[in-house]
Amino acid sequence: MSRTHRLFELLQMLRRRRGPVSGAALAREAGVSLRTLYRDIAALQALGAEIEGEPGVGYVLRPGFLLPPLMFSREEIEALALGAKWVARRTDDSLSDAARNAIAKISAVLPRDLKARLDDDALIVGSGRERPQHVELAALRRALREERKLALSYRDEKGLRTERIVWPVALGFFESARVLAGWCELRGAFRHFRSDRIESARILEERPPRRRQTLLKEWRQNMLTEADSVLAYGRRVSAQAKGSAMTKELVFYTHPQSRGMVVHWVLEEIGAPYSIDVKEYGTTMKAPEYLAINPMGKVPAIRHGDTVVTETAAICAYLADAFPQARLAPAPEARGDYYRWLFFAAGCVEPAMSNHAAGWDPAPDMRARFGYGSYDAVIETLARALAGRRYIAGDAFTAADAYVGSMIGFGMRVGVIDKRPEFEAYWSGLENRPARRRAAAQAEKLASKQAWEPA
């Protein structure tokens, strides 16, 4: 390592620490002798770095000394470029302009080889699924920056509009949504407001009674408390419902943004106590202890006593049989349509939707190789089955409705399934079931905790 590179590495070590650090600790991290470390400190001080301290006491770098862009690594340049591209595409106009301006300033002073990395288009930010905004995000950011209250006109997912006074805490930029977190005076609690549902926003002169950093700590603690109550969820079970199935431990492995929502809904329909074990994509889902539950390393899955069940349709069928008091399956002799449509959703609807969403459908000469044939055939078959029917498998709600309904509701929401009259009528009769709404509320709490957690 050259001495120049070593000096800049030493600066980075000091930057990473908020308080004084001993020369011995710095020397160990840099891999040099203490004598060399002292000489390097003196050289940096001569160059203008405001390093305070002395041998035997410790050193601290005061703010204000800028690291020349010459010393950015290639990975750091790529990280800056990718982050700026994301901001330019996924935020408001003023932040987008600021990101472009910042990259232009960095590019102007970079050496030629690093400038080429900054301009490289090998790393691309996708378009994402954008929702129309009624208010400028810049106004929400200004309210956060100036610590002022906001007067919002907000329309919830049911279409009900309310007027709110909010103490802004944070603004989250997620893949398909922008979410304002804050204390709501109307509800007397912390709430999250999707920006595409904010119809108007006005910054008030009045300030919240507590500083934003204080509110931020309270909000984070509130999220932890709410999430913990979900993870150990259980409802009072009636005397009629009690039985051997109820006495077995029921663990639900899921992720709040996954197919697990279908199983979550069925669990709420059953009414049995259960606990939730949230798994993260790419990490805890692939950990050895979870691979022992599901070797595929995916969710959902359940463990009921000593029985483990994976695959969404199989879990729905198992739960309906294990908890017959919930009446989520017809009598055995009347299960033809129930089994047919439950597994049609798993074997035909889901793969057809997934391939269609990715922009691919089997060519006519290839359809025989695929279990579902074609996307159009699947959708037409499903529409004919639901025409004039409230439930998919008889005169009562079953676990098959939870699965089929979830596929249709999700598909229409993201535009993978057209909003045909048969689908809209069917889903409108299911989406407001109390059990589904409870499951959705719990999943939203878990998603909020996960999304807002610092990286």
Image (spheres, helix red, strand yellow):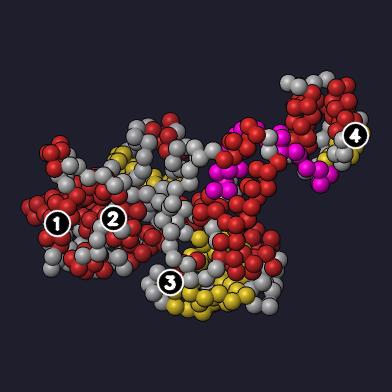
Disc 4 residue type (three-letter): Ala
Of callouts 1 and 3, which one flags the residue occurring earlier in the amino acid sequence? 3
Q: Residue at x 52, y 76 (%)?
A: 200
Q: Residue at x 75, y 38 (%)?
A: 68
- Find the distance from the CA under tag 3 to the CA under tag 4: 60 Å
Disc 1 residue type (three-letter): Glu
Q: Residue at x 79, y 29 (%)?
A: 7
Dot in front, 3 or 2: 2
- Find the distance from the CA under tag 1 to the CA under tag 3: 32 Å
Dot in front, 3 or 4: 4
Question: Which residue is denoted by mark 1 in the rendering?
Answer: 380
Residue 53: quadrant of the picture: top right
Q: Is residue 297 above or below residue 3?
A: below
Q: Where is residue 29 in the image (x, y as percent from the top left)?
A: 75, 26
Of callouts 4 and 2, which one flags the residue occurring earlier in the amino acid sequence? 4
Secondary-structure class at tag 4: helix
Q: Magenta residues? A: 62-85
Secondary-structure class at tag 2: loop
Question: Which residue is denoted by mark 2 in the rendering?
Answer: 416
Q: Residue 70 carries which label?
A: none
Asked whether the residues under the numbered discs 1 and 3 touch, taking CB atoms below 8 Å apart as contact, a structural biologist would say: no
Q: Quadrant of the N terminus?
A: top right
Q: Where is residue 432 in the image (x, y as percent from the top left)?
A: 31, 68
Residue 18: quadrant of the picture: top right
- Depth check: 231 or 408 in front? 408
Q: Residue 46 carries which label?
A: 4
Q: Position of residue 345 (x, y in %)?
A: 21, 50
